[in-house]
Amino acid sequence: MAPAHPPPPLEGKKRRIGMMTSGGDSPGMNAAIRAVVRMAIEANCEVFCIYEGYEGLVQGKEFIKKFEWSMVRGWLSEGGTLIGTARCMAFYERPGRLTAAKNMILNGIDALIICGGDGSLTGADKFRSEWPSLTQELVDTKQLSNEQIEPFRHLNIVGLVGSIDNDMSGTDATIGCYSALGRICEMVDYIEATASSHSRAFVIEVMGRHCGWLALMAGVATGADFVFIPEKPRGRNWKEEMCGIVAQHRKIGKRKTIVIVAEGAHDQDGGKITPEMIKDLLADKSGLALDTRITTLGHVQRGGTACAFDRYLATLQGVEAVNAVLDATPETPTPFIAINENKITRKPLVQAVLDTQEVAKAIEARDFDKAMGLRDTEFSDMYKSYMTTTSTGLNKSMLLPLTKHMRIAIIHVGAPAGGVNAATRAAVAYCLTRGHTPLAIHNGFAGFARHHGDKPMGAVREFNWLEVDGWASKGGSEIGMNRETPQESGMELIASLVKEYKIDALFLIGGFEAFQSLSQLRQAREQYSSLCIPMTLLPATISNNVPGSEYSLGSDTCLNELMHYCDKIKQSASASRRRVFVIETQGGRSGYIATLGGLSVGAVAVYTPEEGISINMLAADIEHLRKAFREDSGQSRAGRLILVNEKASKVYSAKLIADMIREEAHERFESRDSIPGHVQQGGTPSPMDRTRAVRLAIKCVEHLEQFEDRTDESILKNPQSSSVIGIKGASVVFSPMKDVEENETDWKNRRPKDEFWVDLKHIVDSLSGRPEVPRPE
Ligand code: ATP
């Protein structure tokens, strides 16, 4: 029973924070709850979970429950929301909100963190704005006294956007959207195989009433033939346009047709476009006459566990939400936690809610340019990317005049990483749309150099569209990848080959070796005139250690593989004895994968090369494990994980650490080492790696196009003529190689000098309850 009076003021505690999930569920909500609960306790607050969304707030009593640290153990790997969610009609009305306010005060809760969609956050904003009048009404109607409401004059609300639709303005991603996209892409990949076998067409309906993000991104990630999204209906001739594109794709030899349609798709006059209409068009006997099937994905899109991105996004945003509560003053506008590119920020909730409603209104008023304009830059970039890569050769307006056509060579340098093929496909499509000649250099610089002479043009040849069209979802590197740098292959030879093949611009895709190669080529320009061409690098390596960017293609795929591996291993312990797994991760001399992996799976400790490992540190961690197992309530029998980067220490390997733990555990618990190894390079690339590959690759070729004056002098003078594209904070930027090489690179350790994620290690530690351990000197 809830007390009839608010509890006494918190002794020595800062706040009582309420946490709820509301609206449609989305993968990652549990990670947000776990982070809020643990961070709030860590920050000396009390935390209450409110079950069943606003319904629980209105019902009160057993729906509002105090949470302790151990109650969220293992929640990272659970799908849906474990505190329930519901649509609550009562909360739309003032009397419902009045009861909710009373229940909050009776439980002593003075701050609320809500994870939900735009509806839930609209409700939250209304609640906050009415709060003074609601508390006054509680006094006026004698439900509570003035003294009772006094400590609750100000209500702090912080929004976390949990929604699979990604329909909230002001943030690039919502908690759950990449998991849903992952599910869609997985299904489309399966369908593609059978479509190809039978030469069939499939119309796939995905969620999104007002927002086409899922449909558009799925189209980009899978290389679908056509997409329909609500924000940007096709022209009035959409039927002819779609059939024209499909017919062209079939003509060049494609055996499958995939059309993705958002559930809210419509034509320019507001008439609904249904999967049945599309099917009838594709199957029409007098036209394409394709054997066409419809697949409606439905609720599989919501289900399942969260992907790595949603887990660490929800975790970091949950932590930020608690910080926002603690920082709030009565004057602070209510924030929600956003992410822009790679930066987590607080933004005013009211504005975002208004902007989001504007999109729906603009669609209704058929002002589609406005609707697109209100979506973030990533969305419009993606739309442009999609249009460029799907209608290759049909979009004559994008063709450049003959004098501006270039021979653009594409080379993969390093080790395979998810998204490399997708980037190549997009670059080739963009080149063809513009009239350039895309050239494949096989097997990196080694292949370029070795095949010269006996097999002229063997290692270098023109791409054609049909061969790359199926690469959107392919892992590995279809043109071959090699770690050799131009200096190792022979710079003179490389320079002469660039001249021989009349290469006007070079597009490198790869990891630290690609970065090194570009640095060498740049420095050799003074000596070799043929190297005075624009060159740009798109970082792609699972280690995410390329200076100039906070993100490399492939790192997201790797994190997902590692996370699935850890989830399984953790679960395997549930049937056996209590166990600690010490898992060795890849990543070279960068602890990125270990740390973000640790955030995604809830590791007890993460060992990185940046920090190193010492005997005192291990001793402290073993002591912590002993304590944790001693205090285990038995609620969760899953194992505990320690992630150790392959180069964290020359001596303390995963095996040695596991042996030490076992020895010291005195049979109270078990310890095993485990090495996922090359599994981490991934099979099928993740949707994030695929979609970012497309967007960034097109930007790279656009960048190369800018150098119309390619005289030696002009190229040498322009620092941007050798550059690396990167996501830095909230922006996508091209950084001149010279600057990055000289100022941002730790050459000895093959990683950036400042790694943006280093501080995130503290969050892994805080959320696993790891005590302050002695760090190596
Ligand atoms: P999804 O993205 O899945 O649609 P959502 O949060 O937008 O999630 P809604 O059903 O719109 O889902 O809202 C969830 C709950 O939030 C509602 O059931 C209601 O209790 C509350 N709510 C929504 N809009 C308002 C509003 N304008 N005023 C008061 N409460 C609201």
Image (cartoon, rainbow, N blue to C red):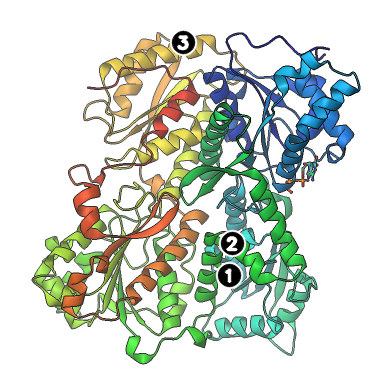
Which type of secondary structure does the marked residue at label 2 adopt?
A: helix
Name the residue at 68% across, 70% down.
Answer: 368
Quadrant occupied by the N terminus: top right
Does the rendering let one see residue 482? yes
The reply to whether callout 3 and callout 1 are in contact (CB within 8 Å) is no
Report which residue position mark 2 lands on: 218
Q: CA distance from mark 1 to mark 2?
A: 8 Å
Amino acid type for the residue under numbered disc 2: Ala
Ligand 1 lies under 8 Å from the Cβ of mark 3: no
Report which residue position mark 3 lands on: 627
Horizontal placement of 490 versus 635: left or right? left
Does the rendering let one see residue 52? no
Where residue 720 appears, as percent x and y from the top left, is: 27, 66
Name the residue at 56% across, 68% down.
Answer: 383
Q: CA distance from mark 2 to mark 3?
A: 46 Å
**418, above or below 652, in the image:** below
**235, above or below 37, in the image:** below
Which type of secondary structure does the marked residue at label 3 adopt?
A: helix
Where residue 441 appears, as percent x and y from the top left, is: 28, 72
Which of the two labelled residues, at mark 1 and mark 2, occupies the earlier sequence position?
2
Give the camera-side residue of 652 and 502.
502
Report which residue position mark 1 lands on: 224
